[in-house]
Image (cartoon, rainbow, N blue to C red):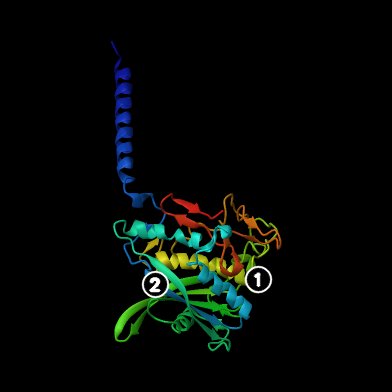
Amino acid sequence: MASPCNFIVKLFALISLFNVCFASRILTTQIEDPQDQQLLRYHNGALLHGKIAVNLIWYGRFKPSQRAIVADFITSLAASPPASSQPSVAAWWKNIEKYYHLANAKKPSSLSLYLGKQILDESYSLGKSLSEKQIVQLASKGDQRNAVNVVLTASDVAVDGFCVNRCGTHGSKNALVKGKNYKFAYIWVGNSETQCPGYCAWPFHQPIYGPQSPPLVAPNNDVGLDGMVMSLGGLLAGTATNPFGNGFYQGPSEAPLEAATACPGVYAKGAYPGYAGDLLVDPTSGASYNAHGTNGRKYLLPAIYDPSTSKCSTLV
């Protein structure tokens, strides 16, 4: 005959097994929703869609050769490079399409970016120390409908928060066009060459903290501008997938984790803190890159969080 003590032990074990099974069923039920498996949640807002001009507003002094680096990058987003020029900027940008299918699988919208106007403000019309409000003021110089207006500030221009906690930002603004209300998206990116290249142009400069590995050679031989392209690429990804603050993101809406910022410091497979990954290297110049662009350009672009695999996707 079983003792009362053995009976209690068996009963406790049975109850524990029931609880484990019940908990497993709850967990299984919770992860059935694909959204619950995503790092970046969709907040049911509009994504950037249609044919959108990317207008470049150059604030301060930039050489024509520097402006060409960014202009060629924008053109490369929609270019169809030859097979010999792979991996390409266009292939990198194609990762963004997955967000559109996730937002509306039955009838996904599409986005086509093209290089719009280039506006020069070489006289520093608002001075050399800018606030967020003044960045928006500059962005408003571009088209206010079907556009992303990109403000690029020169290396001698200070912007609130620049080099402290950001290398650029994106947002949106209401605009009245021909009596109708619209919203246009804007981006700001600063040239960090003289202010904080270790913060905003790594790995083309030694980092300001962490493992101190030798800097890599910039693919366009311009640490500041190559750093700007890295930041601009990530901000374009965030603008496409979260243009008005209610798209794909995680965390607080005023400081969201987005498509590119979800993969910080990752540029190729094998990346770890202080190491950008196993990048391609130009045999002639020794420059490191991961994407081919138009006009023979090479660029280094950040990894994009892939919602279909829940991993950071890299070109190489």
Name the residue rendered at 61%, 80% in the picture.
Answer: 64
Q: Marks 2/1: CA distance?
A: 31 Å
The percent position of residue 123, horizontal first and vertical second, equals: 58, 89
The quarter of the picture where residue 215 lies is bottom right
User: Which amino acid type corresponds to the residue marked 1 in the rendered image?
Assistant: Asp
The percent position of residue 290, horizontal first and vertical second, equals: 58, 59
The answer to whether residue 255 of the structure is visible from this angle is no
> In the current view of this chain or complex, which residue is farthest to the top?
1
Label 2 packing within 10 angstroms: few (<14), some (14-19), many (20+): few
In the figure, is residue 250 to the left or right of 104?
right
Judging by the rendered image, the residue that carries numbered circle 1 is 222
Tell me which label, 2 or 1, sits earlier in the chain.
2
- How many labels were placed on the picture? 2
Of the residues tagged 2 and 1, which is closer to the observer?
2
The quarter of the picture where residue 45 lies is bottom left
User: Which amino acid type corresponds to the residue marked 2 in the rendered image?
Assistant: Lys
The percent position of residue 89, horizontal first and vertical second, equals: 53, 63
Work out which quarter of the rendered image holds the N terminus and state it.
Answer: top left
Label annotation for residue 51: 2
Label 2: element kind: strand
Task: Decide: is 51 above or below 99.
Answer: below
In the figure, is residue 161 to the left or right of 105?
right
Name the residue rendered at 34%, 45% in the picture.
Answer: 31
Task: Decide: is 259 above or below 132.
Answer: above
The one of 80 and 76 positioned closer to us in this rendering? 80
Task: Decide: is 20 above or below 147.
Answer: above
Name the residue rendered at 54%, 74% in the picture.
Answer: 71
Label 1: element kind: loop
The answer to whether residue 178 of the structure is visible from this angle is yes
Label 1 packing within 10 angstroms: few (<14), some (14-19), many (20+): some
